[in-house]
Amino acid sequence: MQYGIIIAVFVYEIAVIAGVGWYLARKEAGHAHQEGDFALGGRSLPVSVVAVTMALTVLGTAHILGVFEMAWTLGASAVWFSIAHVILLVVVCASTGLWVRRMGVSTVPEILETFFGRNTRLLVSCVMAGVIFGILTIETQGIGIIIASMTGWEISNGAVIGGIVGIFYVVLAGIKEVGWVNLVNAVVMYIGLILATVFLAFKLPGGSYESVANYYTDTGNDFMLSIYGTPEILLTFGLGTVIAVVFSQGINQMLLQPTMAAKDEKTIKKALWIAAPVNGLFGVFAVVIGLAAKSMPEFEALGPKVAATTMLVNLLPGWLAALLLASFLAAILSTFAMTSLSPATIFTMDIYKRLYRPDADEAECTRVIRITIVVLAAIAMAVAAYLPPILAAMNWLFSWLVPIFWVVVFGFIWKRSAAAAILTLISAWLTNSAWSFTSLPEVLGMASVANAYVTLGVTLVVGVVANLMFPGQAGYFRSDEYHQKFNAELAVGGNS
């Protein structure tokens, strides 16, 4: 057990979280609470905080441990998970992130009610909250794996300890705390990654990464050194991951909540130039570390879940291993924070306040959000050790959000039809379930076709046909309602 590393990692995490929470509490002492302070930071977050929060929100267990794990079988092609997220951030900062900020909503399902009515909002609220909770359980598993690699504990025990720290991460001051802690952690993370990659080279056989390349060449696995892999990998995993990530996370509450909290739309546009590099480059380092771990017999014997993190603990100097693992844990905790905050926000705003307490004030909503965060995190800790491979689980969960993305896009730019929206959503969700839990793929001879392809196909076919068949209003951006509101805001801006 690496006591020094364990102590250093937890001292760092608690010091940063407590320090930022204390600073924010002092800074805002005596200020009146505004609507959305806890969940949306008063819609005042600056470029740096929005950018890094977006980058780290989708840079968690899947990017770190999931890429380590997937590099075991796919090699360098695992980096497509990171490439997909760079494309995602471009889409969000150029479209959906701007749209939700412009509408001034607190949750994505709120848009669904504006376009398609209350029933559609409630339907999407339940599904989206469930999907994000699924991601939360994976992030909790990641926390458990990081701690297990330092302690030798069971993953379930590590998940409990890490989950408690994760709750601490978000409940003190909400999204403002998450954002400013992320800013500190992003700097530490890249310092650790760069130094670790250099130091690791000297510990490899021959003192360089050439030994890693030789391992895959000598074992007849040259394809694992190329990001293109094989045609099958590129088509099924590479392109399938891009589709699943972009058309799901592009409308996911956990990623759009930081854009809802941005100071203005210009903030979101500028944030892209920080968020994309911070997120995308990480995958390159993760692939290199994952490939190196498998090339060394003593770590390959440990299996894909803990080999890479154990290698880092054993081969790097203690101070650097502590720095790197602290940054890994911080990145996962950031995603943990947003995947607990966002479903809690959906529950509070779309169900509790919308259906039961429409007159609930900011203090009451904050209290409900905090309670929901604790409950969700506790359940996630309980199931974290019993999950499937990380990226496979992520891509399945992402497929549930694909139809929501397109229903919202249709509502913005084409047509707002409640009947078409509900039919599209139900059709895609039933297909996704059938593709996962029945023999339908084998019967059709399409067992290798990813859920994302099938869900996307059903969404587009049913969505287009249903919108042509059913009556509805013009898309929001083509409506008189939007143009009147937009012109009024321009007039106010010009007068000011």
Image (cartoon, helix red, strand yellow):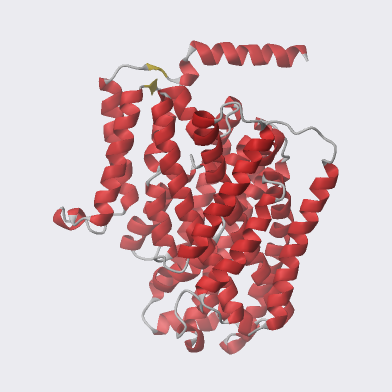
Pick whichever, 36 or 259, lies toward us: 36
Can residue 374 be seen by looking at this rendering? yes
Give the image location of residue 7, x and y in percent: 72, 76
- Residue 262 visible in this rendered orientation of the protein: no
207 to 458, vertically: above or below: below
Q: In the drawing, does residue 336 fall left or right of residue 411?
A: right
Residue positioned 82% across, 35% down in the render:
31
- Place residue 43 in its image quadrant: top right
- For residue 356, side relative to residue 464 (left or right): right
Outermost residue toward the left?
443
Q: Position of residue 230 (x, y in %)?
A: 34, 65
Quadrant holding the C terminus: top right
In this orientation, which residue lies closer to the viewer: 218 or 430? 430
Q: Residue at x 76, y 60 (%)?
A: 16
Taking the image as shown, residue 48 lies to the left or right of residue 252, namely right
Which residue is located at x 54 percent, y 53 percent?
375
Q: Position of residue 82 (x, y in %)?
A: 51, 56
From what the image shows, is residue 233 above or below residue 157?
A: above
Which residue corresponds to the image point at 50% horizontal and 65% vertical from the top-left? 141
Q: Quadrant of the N terminus?
A: bottom right
